Amino acid sequence: MIIRVRQVTAACALGAVLTACGAPDAPHAARPAPSATSAAPSRPPTLAPGPAGLTPVFKNGPRTQGRTVALTFDADMTADEGARAARGERFDNPQLIATLRALKVPATVFMTGRWAEQYPVQARSIGRDPLFEVANHSYSHYAFTGDCYGLPTVAGDRMRSDVERAYTAFRKAGVPDAMPYFRFPGGCYDRQALKSLAATGVTAVQWDVVSGDAFATDADAVARQVLEGVRPGSVVVMHCTRSAAPATERAVRTVVPELRKQGFRFVKVSELIGAEDRLR
């Protein structure tokens, strides 16, 4: 897979406003790679470093290894949105999580550390449910490049610590084994960002299907966009935030049965990365 330096996608044009699902934990040093448990006897699959040791970037799984698709949900809450949450704005979406459970749909939730701090009970519930896996969406949801949909920017020398701080927040919330996968806020990255995160050992996860659910109110339009874009091995980006993506749960109720009717099987990102790694 070719790493595309500086990928910016319309899916995250939600920019600074978007917010979603996360949590905190113990004070020991942050470590992206989760420890083994009985449910996960070995380290989750990751991709080998890219050229010059840069953080590898994953966009979609193999197109020829069966009709699999991964639904991913960004739980975006920025570091400075606590006041809005205190006034009653909801950056979570428990109904969406309940629907995924009812439909038995595995999914990967890319959570910010700030979200996990705001909703620790939900973060813990998601993180301990074998149906889901929690991955890293930064602590702050600040951009890792300049000029990324108006998001504040993380300084180059603080990028690694921002990612590690999110893992610490997940542990404090009771998420036992967050995955070694990272999604850049806004989908924006460049060579410097990939270099800064190399020591964390994460695989950066992007997507190949933009749901268009950010700020959308027409669930049918969101569902249609997903259904038209999905191919075998696709990674779909959606959001787990009531305030910024109010139509997502309704769209999922349309997307899931239709894709199953077409013969697709829902998987977590880890399964797609494992399949891609085996082909290399």
Image (cartoon, grey):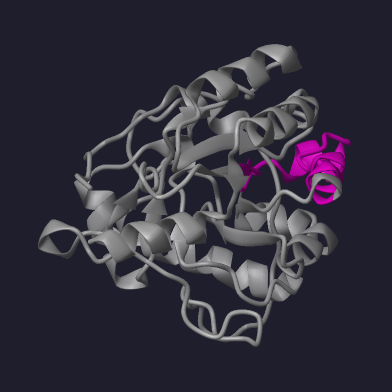
Residue segment shown in magenta: 72-101
Rendered residue at 77%/54% (across/down): 118
Rendered residue at 62%/61% (across/down): 134
226 is within the stretch colored magenta: no
Could you say which quadrant of the image residue 130 lies in?
A: bottom right
Does residue 197 appear in the picture of this structure?
A: no
From the top left corner, tell me how far across and down residue 132 is, in percent: 68, 59
223 in relation to 110, above or below: above
| Of 238 and 198, the residue lying toward us | 238
From the top left corner, tell me how far across and down residue 31 is, in percent: 48, 78
From the top left corner, tell me how far across and down residue 93 is, in percent: 81, 41
Does residue 114 appear in the picture of this structure?
A: yes
Q: Is residue 119 left or right of residue 209?
A: right
Could you say which quadrant of the image residue 171 lies in?
A: bottom right
- Residue placed furthest toward the left: 52
| Of 145 and 6, the residue lying toward us | 6
Q: Is residue 87 left or right of residue 264?
A: right
Q: Is residue 251 left or right of residue 181?
A: right
